Image (cartoon, rainbow, N blue to C red):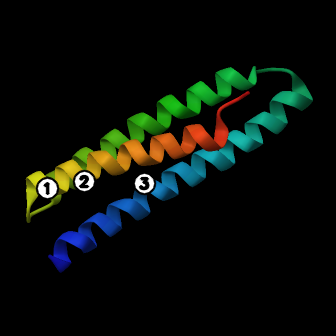
């Protein structure tokens, strides 16, 4: 059980870092958009959301492949974490 929890904690750290990185990049993009007028905030948001989703999917697939214990349980938990962190990104950054 401890190994299982450690695996989930490692994935949680990976997912949180991806969300934090994209949120920071998006914030910088918003500042750049407002000063140059080159890209619409909605376009930047959707671009980051799409990329984040793909990165989380890729990381989850790699993580599930290497998980050795309780593969079905880990798979379920990992996908739930992906949904949670995508929702967190949306709540933090969705343009009004």
57 on left or right of 4? right
Q: Nearer the viewer, mark 1 or mark 3?
A: 1
Q: Residue at x 53, y 33 (%)?
A: 49
Q: Are marks 2 and 3 in contact (CB under 8 Å)?
A: no
Q: Which mark is residue 38?
A: none
Where's residue 94, x and y in %? 65, 33
- CA separation, marks 2 and 3? 12 Å
Mark 2 — residue?
77
Where's residue 80, x and y in %? 31, 47
Q: Are marks 2 and 1 in contact (CB under 8 Å)?
A: yes
Q: Is label 1 in a helix, a strand or a loop? A: helix
Q: Quadrant of residue 5?
A: bottom left
Task: Decide which of tag 2 and tag 3 comes sooner along the chain.
Answer: 3
Where's residue 15, x and y in %? 42, 54
Q: Residues within 10 Å of mark 2 (few under 14, many from 20)?
A: some
Q: Residues within 10 Å of mark 3 (few under 14, many from 20)?
A: many
Q: Residue at x 39, y 35 (%)?
A: 54
* Residue nearer the viewer, 43 or 2: 2
Q: Where does the N terminus fall, quadrant-wise?
A: bottom left
Q: Is label 2 in a helix, a strand or a loop? A: helix
Q: Nearer the viewer, mark 2 or mark 3?
A: 2
Where's residue 90, x and y in %? 57, 37
Q: Residues within 10 Å of mark 1 (few under 14, many from 20)?
A: few
36 on left or right of 93? right
Q: Residue at x 74, y 43 (%)?
A: 27
Mark 1 — residue?
73
Mark 3 — residue?
15
């Amino acid at each position: 059980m401890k190994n299982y929890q450690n695996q989930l904690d490692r994935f949680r750290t990976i997912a949180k870092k991806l969300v934090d990185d994209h949120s920071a990049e998006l914030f910088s993009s918003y500042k750049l958009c407002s000063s140059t007028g080159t890209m619409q905030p909605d376009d930047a948001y959707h671009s980051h959301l799409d990329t984040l989703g793909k990165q989380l999917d890729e990381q989850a697939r790699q993580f599930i492949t290497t998980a050795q214990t309780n593969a079905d349980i880990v798979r379920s938990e990992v996908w739930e974490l992906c949904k949670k962190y995508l929702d967190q990104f949306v709540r933090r950054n969705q343009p009004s």
